[in-house]
Amino acid sequence: MLEEERKYDVDPEFTLPDLSGVVPDGVRVVELPPVTLTATYLDTTDLRLARAGVSLRHRKGDELPWTVKLPADSPGVRHEISRTGRPKSTPADLVALVTAYSRGAELGPAATVRTVRRAYELRDDTDRVLAELADDAVQVLDGKQVRSTFREIELERKDGGRELLDAVESALTGSGARAGAFTPKHVRALGSVAEAAPDLVPPGELPELPSAGDVVSVAVRRSVGRLLAHDPLVRLRAPVGDDDTAVHQMRVGCRRLRSDLRTFGPLVRKAWAAPLRDELKWLAGVLGQARDAEVLRARLSRTAAADPLSPLDPAAVERMDRVLVARHEAALAAVDEALGSARYHALVEALVDAARTPQLTARADGPADEVLPRLVARPWHRLTDGDDETDGAADLDPAAPDERWHAVRINGKRARYAVDAVAGVLGGDAAKLARALAKVQDLLGEHQDAAVAAETWLSIAEQDPGDHAVAVTAGRLVERERAAVRAVRAAFPDAWQQANRGRRTAWLG
């Protein structure tokens, strides 16, 4: 679950204001009995979790004493996952959740804090909790000795809106509370070491006149960050949007990094990049099985419902979906096995090292606007012209087999990733080409999804030749998928013409 929280520093003598006068009509403030909570936080010896904004704790006094908190996209918003368990038996799945941050290093007690909490719930007239305010008096313990103390206010959003939190915040700050940086209790307890930079170097900003190596470094760090940020979400089976999944995003991180290391090959040391590309290919392959099953399940539902005036047999569709569910579960089990392996732990370590110090060649010292266009031109010309085995997009036969269209799709993805990597620094026509290629790639992706889906529906029907309802349903689904293929082939020439305009590609040389 996502936790959205705000913190405020207050002096020991701070007096909590009367909140009944600031909350909307129909909202009342309910004081809860005070509780004492003793939390022990686990970390590596060099505090990798704390420095990355991650925590793993056991807290006495909670119904679910074991909790992991992971950073989300916004400040003050975190993923919170809790489990039962004994104090000295850390749940294995929670340890796995922090793998991308601990990198398999041993975890042990790092800080213990005791909190006397006076909490207040803000409830509406149906007794729904809209927000919770916690007034915490905190003691940092060293054994049985109190090493330091502080007091803070936590304001957590529940079922209410942010405007309610804003109103309460205004009352708190008006009474002397200080809204500042979001610093967890254990980080304050551990001190400056816990506030040091994380091991995973973020992409950062490019200098005003970047070198080619600067651009490559940012691209590497962005993809590594994307991959590792979705590691725990893959393990949790957590969605990352209305129509996206963590498996997809983690796989994209693998593919983009592999593509960038290939496109910018002359700028990176081969002995460094080649093993990374090999291991990323392995991981992308494992994730790909799960992603393919995700896509097929979503497509089955969407294609079956595409024509409400000509409905398909719902029972037959359900039986087909059960086949896909079994494939999906088997693929996710393979993902779990891979993410728990020593091979993956070694890859995570290598990725963190890659983001910290990309291994660049002397050629990377050259100006980005001089070096990069020539490198991006290679995947671009491969897309446009093809090779001995692959048609180019410029002369792709509308009647060519699906495999030919898929080959162009692969080249299109590489070209798009290459242009994306440089569009931010080259701007102008490069950015326009990136947007146009995205539309081309969307069409080619739809073509591939429809073609694969058609083959899948037939293969499912062939598994049980006696199920005539499934056979008929599969045949009707195939008709709809082939119609989608034809629609893409009809739309492709115009989309390609928009991407291949001379003024958008002149910078490639």
Image (cartoon, rainbow, N blue to C red):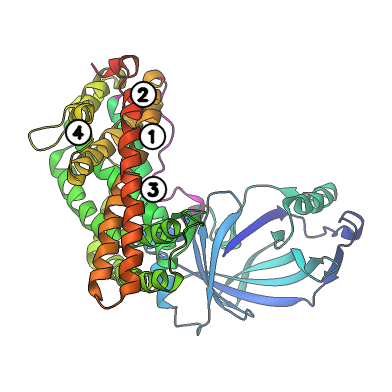
- The type of residue carrying mark 1 is Lys
Q: Which mark is residue 397?
A: 4
Quadrant of the image occupied by residue 154 = bottom right
> What's the magenta region?
193-211
Viewer-nearest residue: 384 or 454: 454
Q: Position of residue 317 (x, y in %)?
A: 40, 68
Work out whether mark 1 precedes mark 4 in sequence or the reverse, and give the earlier one.
Answer: 4
Residue on which the image places disc 3? 225
Q: Which amino acid does label 4 sit on?
A: Asp
Cα distance between the residues tagged 2 and 1: 9 Å
Q: Are marks 2 and 1 in contact (CB under 8 Å)?
A: yes
Q: Residue at x 24, y 52 (%)?
A: 280
Q: Which amino acid does label 3 sit on?
A: Gly
What's the residue at 66%, 68% (across, down)? 139
The residue sitting at the left extreme is 388
Residue 335 position within the rendered picture, expressed as x and y whole percent measured from the top left: 30, 66
Q: Name the residue under label 1.
A: 439
Residue at the spot of label 2: 498
